[in-house]
Image: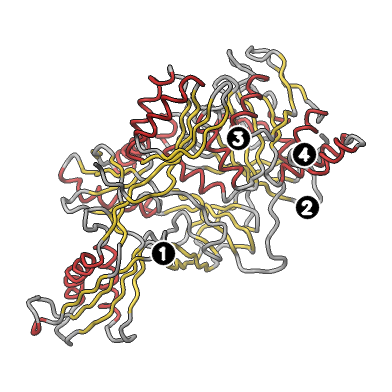
Amino acid sequence: MHIQTTPRTPRTLNIGILAHVDAGKTSLTERLLFDHGAVDRLCSVDAGDTRTDDNGIERRRGITIRSAVASFTVGGTQVNLIDTPGHSDFVAEVERALEALDGAVLLLSAVEGVQARTRVLMRTLRRLRLPTLVFVNKIDRSGARTEGLLADVRRLLTPHVAPLTRVTGAGTAHARVVRRPPDERTAEALAEVDPDILAALVDGPEPAAGDLRAALAARTADGSFHPLYHGSALGGQGVPELVEGLLGMVPAAAPATPGPTAPRGTVFAVRPGPGGERTAYLRLYDGEVRPRRRLTFLRRESDGRTTEVTGRVTRLDVVGGAGTLTAGNIAALTVPGGLRVGDRLGDLTDRAPQFAPPTLETVVRARYAEQAAPLRSALLALADQDPLLHARPTASGTTALLLYGEVQMEVLAATLAEDFGIDAEFAPGRVRFLERPAGTGEAAEEMPWLDRTRYWATIGLRVEPGPRDSGGVFAYETELGALPRAFHQAVEETVHATLLTGLTGAAVTDYRVTLIRSGFSSPVSTAADFRGLTPIVLRRALRRAGTLLYEPYQAFEVEVPPDALAPVTARLASLGADLTGTTGGDPAWLITGELPARRVREAELRLPGLTRGEAVWSSRPSEDRPLKPTH
């Protein structure tokens, strides 16, 4: 395929590299940077000197934990590479990065083949219709497969794929990549997603080579088809062909609004710096951002509220070196007060990432008493950078955290030790449950001369269910200005803090609390009176409303040998799984469904014995459901 590498106007491509852990993402990033002159030395994961894994923990463990950005130039195209984590515990990092991308490279290992995490990633990429090229890495390693692996890709990932390269000497140090122009097999695969190619195959004349190239580029651009390339990130074989495919088949996103417009973008990654300063990575979709410009970001809080973060850009480093951030590009910037992942310029709902919150809860305590206060400050600071790392104080003086998995817990412990000098202990993780109001309840308390309370405040509250996924909402029916602003704020903040623990001990969500009565006595009443009385009134109203307990579920898929179908489905059913599909049969069955998160680990431990170790399991957070009564 001929690619024009010097377009008339400069363009930028933001490309994500995604893969199962250890498939070679970081090695491919280093190869691309070296081959195109962005770095003068080829670094490696084994040596621990890679550019994108610049965190000490990343280098020691040999895994990517946080998304990183690097760039290189080919002709008139600047390619920004976003190297994303591969371990499932860091799924939120991956999904945040996806919204900043124009296209993706999904990496497979020619030795390990299609792995569980790879299938999860491909499902997400196809759901988002993100242009995706498949790169089969490690063709020069012993045990590398090519044709057999292509059959696995079509069976396990997607049938809408066609190889544009082939390999000679696979599995040896002499492995080489040969171009494979689109042919009749490519046409047959394209015909499943392109009506023009289908018509040409059925009615004639057969599509010409130029027609196939045009259809391949168009269907790749709309995310319905995937070119496949072979190569070796360490050896460099096949990488030029992959770059050619990226430039020719992944379109750069054009600004949505022609002409001058307000800046619109999203913060998809945050890196902490010295002195508590945070560097935020911003992908801009419209407009432009210059140094010293005053910007207003919208932030959705964990309780459902929307707040504004306004500040002047004190530092702006555009990836690629330009002084002004323009639409389609990425920059590292600093705004006083600090930005969080998910903060947005423009419409808060525009291109908003969709991912389930973490469901594993743990309690963290300092190993040494004198570090208890610094530990809490450090955890709150880390949670402030990452809105999915929920941290809250417990009654015992420890801190509760929400995480995605055990590996994330280990990384967090190392971060506390290295970045903050704190030795922390983590309790074994347990699945987090949630409460939602079951009905409506009201309660009120008057000032001291009318009742037994010691607070100089009058408060009446109504608790009722809110819309699903709304978090917590506070409203008022009292006359505007009836309370001083400080008293009103004290009630609102205390409501949200109190409902972190519901009637059963789980956090309450999707609630609406309304202030229906208020009063104070000047100058005696203080904000402390309202903070003290609010939990008493709120608890009484919540008990009258009642709550329902919900537990998180995970969507799963498991591939099992044909003779294991019956025992596996029986075991899953006994664990409370809802089976949604069973497909395949030869050489394996694919079972899909949803399972209570608290039973996932048990399912994973049972599967090897039921399938002679041949099961391939993957799961991800999906939704929560009312807790079923036990008999």
Q: Which residue type does callout 4 highlight?
A: Leu
In front: mark 3 or mark 1? 1
- Image quarter for residue 236? top right
The residue closer to the viewer here, 314 or 331, is: 331
In front: mark 2 or mark 4? 4
Q: Which residue is mark 4?
A: 216
- Image quarter for residue 24? top right
Q: Secondary structure at mark 2?
A: loop
| Residue that appears at 73% across and 36% down | 245
Q: Please, is residue 313 above or below residue 159 in the view?
A: below
Q: Which residue is mark 1?
A: 467
Name the image quarter holding the N terminus: top right
| Residue that appears at 64% across and 46% down | 129
The residue closer to the viewer here, 292 or 385, is: 385
Q: Which residue type does callout 2 highlight?
A: Thr
Percent position (x, y) of residue 316? 55, 56
Q: Are marks 2 and 3 in contact (CB under 8 Å)?
A: no
In front: mark 2 or mark 1? 1
| Residue that appears at 25% across and 66% down | 545
Q: Which residue is mark 3?
A: 106
Query: Which of the marked residues, 3 or 1, is nearer the chain's N terminus?
Result: 3
Q: Residue furthest right?
A: 205
Q: Which residue type does callout 1 highlight?
A: Pro
Measured in 3D between alpha carbons, the distance from the residue under mark 1 to the one under mark 4, in whole angstroms, is 43 Å
